[in-house]
Image: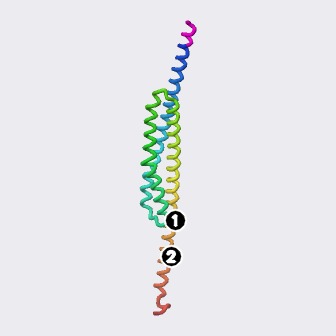
């Protein structure tokens, strides 16, 4: 009888230790998710989108910019608040012993963060490409303006040779 009681006590201690270890590991994972969420905030994609509004884009480049802006807004208004909600729920659930639900929420938060990171990286890359296109267009316009001014000078200086 005493051996059974000792066995139950040892089993309870092991079970308590496993739950405690799971909660500690989950707490570290939640902190890692919070850090990744903060890293997304530190990308400052919103400022890049604002500077994109100052570019002189037309046609396909403007369409591409609008698509990137919509993608950014989707992440900002839907995905990031959803990540925050899942992380807050995780903090509550991690205190309990519902291991399956907590693991599923961890996976969901990780997937959402991966998706948001991919989208924001895509938006940043697209904005950089549009900035390059804009600077190339500005350089071409400046070159054409210079060529026009040179031709105008030639035409004005030789206008008598062309006749009325």
Q: Residue furthest top?
A: 2
Q: Which residues are magenta?
A: 1-7
At mark 2, the secondary structure is helix
Q: How much space separates mark 1 and mark 2, taking CA atoms?
A: 16 Å
Residue 151 horizontal/vertical position (percent): 50, 80
Q: Residues within 10 Å of mark 1 (few under 14, many from 20)?
A: few
Residue 43 horizontal/vertical position (percent): 47, 47
164 is higher (above) or lower (below) than 78: below
Q: In front here: 140 or 69?
A: 69
Q: Is residue 143 magenta?
A: no
Q: In front here: 37 or 55?
A: 37
Counting residues from the start of the chain, the first of labels 1 and 2 encountered is 1
Which residue does the image show at 53% across and 38% down from the upper left?
107
Q: Residues within 10 Å of mark 2 (few under 14, many from 20)?
A: few
Q: Quadrant of the N terminus?
A: top right
Q: Quadrant of the C terminus?
A: bottom left
- Nearer the observer: mark 1 or 2; the answer is 1
Q: What is the number of the mark on residue 126?
A: none
Identify the residue position indicated by label 1 in the image.
Answer: 136
Colouring chosen for the image of the structure:
rainbow
Q: In front here: 156 or 28?
A: 28
Residue 104 horizontal/vertical position (percent): 52, 36
Q: What is the number of the mark on residue 147?
A: 2
Which residue does the image show at 52% across and 58% down from the upper left?
129
Residue 19 horizontal/vertical position (percent): 51, 24
Q: Residue furthest bottom?
A: 164
């Amino acid at each position: 009888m005493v051996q059974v009681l000792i066995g139950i006590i040892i089993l309870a201690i092991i079970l308590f230790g496993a739950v405690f270890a799971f909660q500690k590991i989950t707490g570290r994972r939640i902190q890692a998710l919070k850090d990744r969420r903060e890293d997304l905030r530190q990308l400052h994609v919103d400022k890049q989108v604002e500077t994109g509004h100052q570019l002189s884009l037309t046609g396909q480049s403007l369409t591409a910019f609008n698509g990137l802006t919509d993608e950014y807004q989707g992440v900002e208004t839907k995905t990031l608040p959803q990540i925050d909600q899942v992380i807050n729920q995780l903090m509550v659930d991690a205190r309990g012993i519902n291991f399956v639900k907590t693991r599923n929420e961890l996976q969901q938060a990780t997937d959402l963060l991966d998706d948001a990171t991919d989208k924001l990286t895509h938006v940043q890359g697209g904005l950089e490409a549009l900035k390059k296109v804009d600077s190339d267009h500005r350089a071409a316009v400046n070159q054409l303006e210079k060529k026009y001014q040179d031709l105008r000078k030639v035409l004005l200086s030789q206008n008598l040779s062309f006749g009325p």
